[in-house]
Each structure stands twice: as C-alpha cells, then as structure tokens.
Image: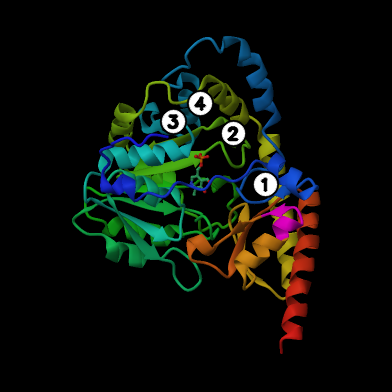
C-alpha cells in the first residue's frame, strides 16, 4: 500500500504490539488433535451458569445503550463491600481501569513503580502515555520485594502497581509488608493493588486491602469477573478506591465503557456461590495433584495463591514447543526473564491429567537426550 506520512511520538513508535494467541481452532487444525489451553489463567469450568441465564434474558435489549453508571452492580457491590458507591468504578476488564489510572495520573516523564516480572500490561500503558516504567526485580524466591519497591519511589513517582497475587509467579505480598510499605510512601503516590486472582487465595496473611480504602489511603483495589467468575470474554472488572481517585477515573472513562450483557451477567455471577465454590475447590484439588506429580518427576515449582503456577523445567521454550505439539498450550516465560520456567493454568481434572501425561513424556525425552550426551 502507498506509504503515508504520520506524526508519531517516540513513546508510541517504540511500543511492541502484544502478541495475540492463535485461535484454538487453528491450533487444532494444524495438530489434528483438540488442544487444551492452560495458558491464560481462565476458569476451566466455564462461566457461571447464572450469568449465562441472565445474558439470555437481556439479549432483546441490545438495541439500547448500556447503563453508563452500572447502577445495579454498583449498588450491589457497594453494599457487599461496605464502601460508598462513589468508591466503585467499572471497566472494560480491569485492564481498562489500569489504563484509566495511568491516563489520569501520569504525564511525560512521570514514573510508575512496578515489579519485574509482573503483569505485562502495566509497562505497556505507562510507555504509551509517555511515562517511565520503573521495574523492580523480584527477590530470590520470586516474590515482590516491597522494600526494593519503596527504594525505587522518587519525587516523580505518581503510581505504584502491585499485582497480588503476582502474575506470572502466583506469589503474594503479606498484610504486614504492605502496611509498612504504604505507611512509608510520600503523599501524592497512588497505589493500585491488582487482585485479579483474589478469590483463589488461601493464605491467611493476605492483606485485607479494602481496609486500606476504608482508612482513606490513596489506594485502589482492582478485581475482575474474568477469572473465578469465568466471564473473561465479556470484559468487566472493577476498582474500589478512595472516592477522589475514582472521581478522576470516571471523568476520563468513556460513558458506555461496560456493555449491558457484562453488567447483567456479573450481577448474576456475584450471587452464584455454588459456581464460585466449585471453581475454588477445582483449583485446590488440581494444584495438589499437579504439585505431587511434578515433584515426583524431580522438577521444582513455585507455590501459588492463584489459578496458575510456574514450573522450573530448564529449557522453558523447548518444553513449551514440545507440549504444544502434543496439544497442550502453556505459557513460556522467556519474555518475562524467566527462561527456565513455564507457566501453567490449573485445568479441569481431565485437563490436568492430560497435561501431566504430556509433561511426563517431554520430561522423559529431555532425560534421554541428556543421557546420550554425558
Ligand atoms: C494481574 C492481572 N491483572 C489484571 C488482569 C486483567 O484482567 P481483565 O480480564 O479484568 O482485564 C489479569 C489477566 O490476566 C492479570 O493477570
């Protein structure tokens, strides 16, 4: 096509597009087997059935624009969380709220502190906005080091992102660590506690993050309907934060950013205790099984508080490719600076068994290869 002249800023020029995964049907056509996808931390049990029912009931209203305030959902969540309605904001996935935060609080040269590796979207949106992503390495146990993050805060810091549990490690920061960190922050720094996997957490030392909001700190907690509620395809998440922070996000966001099916579905999913419990139980049992089998094969792994975990395989890319050939899609970690690891999402019982079969075969191949090269 004929070239065109564009005026583009350097920060946009330097961005690299997020590599999209191939549709599962394409992988199936190529391999000739139905692949299992354990790569995106989705709920393997499917969406909340109550949500699906609610969507069916709302289809005939699709000619109307959605309710721009998410009236019913806001009311329900505010009651449930014990915070005023002005403290709640909704987004097209929690991804959108991450973006709204950066657009509201970051301008040219402002700094945003985050762990490395952590959720890949944080540095992307910061760079697009012309900000500086200050990336703080994890500690030796692959946990976020809040002490190091505190040291990275400067006069230019406007935002801090803490994914808790962290993606891709599944590790958490504890309440005592987080309180110390927040107490030591200078005024004017907004802290985003991204709790996309909150509902899976078992560790009792996990922070009661909404208390920080109730205390009036400059904090916003992000949660999502994409993970345990099984509604990733609908795109809806929410933030609960200091009303002044939320006010700015509401000014910046598009008026109809959350679609009407997402609104009715998530309202119904909130009441679906059974789906939530089943999903939590499936994750717990799946992890116990996977930990046991992987240990038996002699690999180490990182204990998780989420629905995914890291396995140390040595050649992460090689393992990823061989597993893919066997119809098992996991996430290689080289791009996250963890080339020795793969990240695996917990599947259904059958998927976990299929994963372990393939994983065992690949492990054997590697052992044989090593044996033939003493
Ligand atoms: C840490 C973290 N935050 C946020 C998200 C995005 O969730 P959503 O689907 O609500 O945009 C993810 C999804 O993978 C995640 O891992």
Where is mark 1, residue-wise?
A: 280
Q: Residues within 10 Å of mark 1 (few under 14, many from 20)?
A: many
Q: Residue 353 in the image: x percent, y percent?
A: 80, 56
**Front in this rendered view, residue 17 or 292:** 17
> Element at badge 3?
strand
Residue depth check, mark 2 versus mark 1: number of the one nearer the observer: 2
Where is mark 2, residue-wise?
A: 233
* 355 sits left or right of 343 in the view: right
* 11 sits left or right of 359 in the view: left
> Disc 4 to disc 1, how far (Cα)?
22 Å
* 342 sits left or right of 188 in the view: right
> Element at badge 2?
helix
Q: Residues within 10 Å of mark 4 (few under 14, many from 20)?
A: some
Q: Residue 31 in the image: x percent, y percent?
A: 76, 50
Q: How crowded is mark 2: few (under 14 residues within 10 Å), some or many (20 or more)?
A: few
> Element at badge 1?
helix
> Disc 2 to disc 3, how far (Cα)?
16 Å
- Tell me: residue 237, above or below residue 358: above
Task: Please give the name of the residue rendered at 48% of the width and 53% of the height, measured from the top-left corner.
Answer: 164
For the residue with label 3, is its CB less than 8 Å from the closest atom of ligand 1? no
Quarter of the C terminus within the rendering? bottom right
For the residue with label 4, is its CB less than 8 Å from the closest atom of ligand 1? no
Residue range in magenta is 323-329
- Tell me: residue 295, above or below residue 183: below
> Disc 1 to disc 3, how far (Cα)?
24 Å
Residue 324 magenta: yes
Q: Residue 74 in the image: x percent, y percent?
A: 46, 25
Where is mark 3, residue-wise?
A: 90
Disc on res. 76:
4
In this view, which residue lies farthest toward the bottom? 374
């Amino acid at each position: 096509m004929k070239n065109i002249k564009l005026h583009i800023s350097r920060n946009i020029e330097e961005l690299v597009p997020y590599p999209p995964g191939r549709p599962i049907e394409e992988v199936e056509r190529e391999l000739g087997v139905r692949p299992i996808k354990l790569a995106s931390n989705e709920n393997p049990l499917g969406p909340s059935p109550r949500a699906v029912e609610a969507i069916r009931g709302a289809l005939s209203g699709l000619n109307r624009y959605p309710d721009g305030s998410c009236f019913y959902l806001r009311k329900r969540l505010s009651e449930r969380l014990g915070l005023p309605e002005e403290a709640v904001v909704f987004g097209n996935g929690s991804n959108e709220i991450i973006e709204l935060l950066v657009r509201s609080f970051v301008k040219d040269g402002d700094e945003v502190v985050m762990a490395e590796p952590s959720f890949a979207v944080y540095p992307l949106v910061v760079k697009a906005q012309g900000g500086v992503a200050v990336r703080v390495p994890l500690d030796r146990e692959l946990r976020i080091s809040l002490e190091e993050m505190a040291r990275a805060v400067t006069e230019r810091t406007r935002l801090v992102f803490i994914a808790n549990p962290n993606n891709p490690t599944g590790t958490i920061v504890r309440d005592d660590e987080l309180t110390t960190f927040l107490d030591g922050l200078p005024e004017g720094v907004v802290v985003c506690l991204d709790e996309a996997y909150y509902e899976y957490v078992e560790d009792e030392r996990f922070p009661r993050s909404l208390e920080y909001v109730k205390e009036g700190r400059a904090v916003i907690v992000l949660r999502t309907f994409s993970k345990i509620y099984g509604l990733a395809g609908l795109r809806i998440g929410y933030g609960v934060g200091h009303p002044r922070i939320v006010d700015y996000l509401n000014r910046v966001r598009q008026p109809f950013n959350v679609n009407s099916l997402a609104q009715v579905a998530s309202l119904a999913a909130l009441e679906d205790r059974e789906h939530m419990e089943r999903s939590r139980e499936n994750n717990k049992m799946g992890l116990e099984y996977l930990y046991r089998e992987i240990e038996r094969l002699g690999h180490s792994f990182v204990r998780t508080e989420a629905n995914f975990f890291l396995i140390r395989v040595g050649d992460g890319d090689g393992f990823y490719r061989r597993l893919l050939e066997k119809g098992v899609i996991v996430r290689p970690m080289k791009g996250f600076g963890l080339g020795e690891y793969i990240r695996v999402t917990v599947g259904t019982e059958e998927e976990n068994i299929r994963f372990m079969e393939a994983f065992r075969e690949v492990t054997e191949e590697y052992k044989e290869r090593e044996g033939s090269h003493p």
